[in-house]
Structure formats: C-alpha cells, structure tokens
Amino acid sequence: MIMRLVRAFVYSNLFVAVLLSCLTLSTYSMLDYLSFNWFVPVSILLGSFVLYTFHRLYKIDFIPKDQLAQRHLWVLKYATYLKYAMSLAVFIQLLILPNFHADAIVWIIPAGIISAGYTIPLLPTATGWQRFRDIPFAKPIIISLVASYLTFGFPIFEQMGMEDLFSREIFPLFIERVLFLLAVTIPFDLRDISNDQRAGLSTIATQFGFQKGRQVGLLVAVLWFIQTGYVSLMGNSIEVAVIYLGIFSLIIMGYILMKQSWEELKYTLVFEGLILTYALAFILLSRFHSMA
C-alpha cells in the first residue's frame, strides 16, 4: 500500500513539482534580502506539474511497447485523472497570474518555449522538425538550465529585475545551482540508456556507456563542489560550506552505489531526493538563523 502511494506521488509528477517548489523556497532562504512572495513557489508548483504531466502524456500512445517504462504504464492507466488535474492547475495558475508584473511574465516566456520544445518538435533541421531533447547530450543541460532559471532566477527577476541575476553577488550562486542540478540529472540519462538507445537518441549514456557516463556525472559533481567553495568564501559562511560538503558526500555516495539494474523509482527517490535535501537544508538554516 505504501509503495503504491509512493509510486502515485512520483509518477503523477507531484513529487517533482513539490521539490521544485521547495527549491524555489530555498532561493529566498539563500538570499534573505528578498521579500517572500508566496505566489512564486506556488506558480512553480503548478507550472512544473503541468509541464511534466504534458511531457508524460504527449503522444504516449505512440511509444513502442518495448520502450514503455513503469512511469509510462502508470500514466497510461491514470491519464484521464491527470488531464483533470492539469486543467485544475492551469485554472488556479490563471487566478494567481494578476499578482505578477508584466516584466516577470515576459521573462518566463523563454523558459516556457524551451520546456515546450523539449517535448514538441519546434527546432527546424535539415532532416525535419526535432525536439530540443533530440540535440546530442542536451537533455540534462536543458533540464538543469531551465530548472535553475525558474527556481533561482524567477524569484530574483520577479522582484528585482533581470539585470540583478547577473550581478557579481548573485550570478555565482546561479552557476552553483546549474551545476548541482546537472550533477543530479545525469543519472537519469544513465537510467534511460536502454530506451534512448532504441529511440536513437544521443545522450551521455548512449554515447559513453553506463560506467563512463557515471564518470562524467562525478566530474560535474566535483566541478559543482569547487564552485560551492567559491560561493562559501564569497559569503564567508562556514555553515553553508558544511551543507555543501554534506550534500556533495551524498551525491558521491549515490553515484558509487548506483547500478544499471536499479528500478526507475529508486533513481527518482535517490537523486531527486538529493534536490529536496539541498532545498530543505537551506530552508532550515534560514529558519535557524531567524530564531537565533
């Protein structure tokens, strides 16, 4: 019974929507001079649920049976309910929309286009229209950039303006977020190696294999940890450095223990769980400071 509920929470995309919303909340904790606007993390929650569910449902009936994973089978079974949930999420999002300034909505559009192009063929090529995820090695890069833009950049440009995202104080934190999400996203390329090979996609896993793909992910994790050292020195915070060290240790442990035979649910709970751990660590640190 418990595992059925866990699968429903994960495969319905509620889990990824919640963790991206928490990641947005962590941005307010990391930049304590930002005023908390509740409608930003709520919009991330609703928007990510709609986008991920749309990605799951789009042409799912055309996926060959030998490429259907557990998440696809679950979505096929509950597709009608997911469509109702998407409609409700869009309706609530429209009610929230008047809280945003026009400039913030304009800067959200690029992320929306890229997210749509990840699923729908929007890229013209010599051989026809392609999805952005069909670009060799692009899948984890697109996910990490868009997720960082929304969960880190959105709270900033919604309140302060887009130019502040590129300031000397804030931009290194944005790069840190991108590298972190890239390090915990590459394992999903490794998870999907068999299906991506059958689909003819060029990914880190299909081009380098599972073991070398793991090494690429570990290299990105090391680059992220180096960047966290710079961020920690910039903020002169030992507590933040300790959080980064703990999360880095968990990432390395996840990569070491990871096996190609893992069920897809285990990949999600381990590596998306690391995103939730990262977010909650900074939220709790901020709460501790406010109570001190």
Image: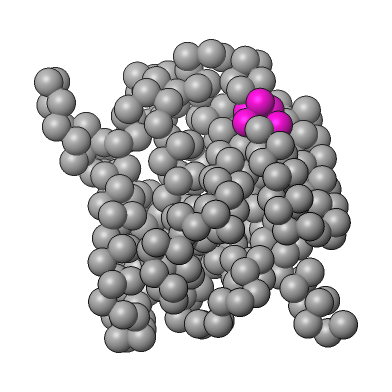
Residue 136 visible: yes
Q: Is residue 94 above or below residue 244?
A: below
* Most foreground residue, 200 or 277: 277
Q: Quadrant where the C terminus lies?
A: bottom right
Picture coordinates of residue 54, whole percent (x, y): 33, 55
Residue 243 visible: no
In magenta stretch: residue 209: no
Q: Main secondary structure of the magenta part?
A: helix
Picture coordinates of residue 200, whole percent (x, y): 35, 19
Number of numbered markers: 0
Q: Is residue 213 left or right of residue 148?
A: right
* Most foreground residue, 170 or 283: 170
Q: Is residue 48 left or right of residue 70?
A: left
Read off the magenta span: 217-222
Q: Residue at image x 46%, y 55%?
A: 166
Picture coordinates of residue 267, whole percent (x, y): 64, 40
* Most foreground residue, 141 or 63: 141
Q: Is residue 16 above or below residue 68?
A: below
Q: Quadrant where the N terminus lies?
A: bottom right
Q: Is residue 206 above or below residue 49?
A: above
Picture coordinates of residue 79, whole percent (x, y): 36, 58
Q: Residue at image x 26%, y 36%?
A: 131
Q: Is residue 158 left or right of residue 257?
A: left
Q: Residue at image x 39%, y 69%?
A: 161
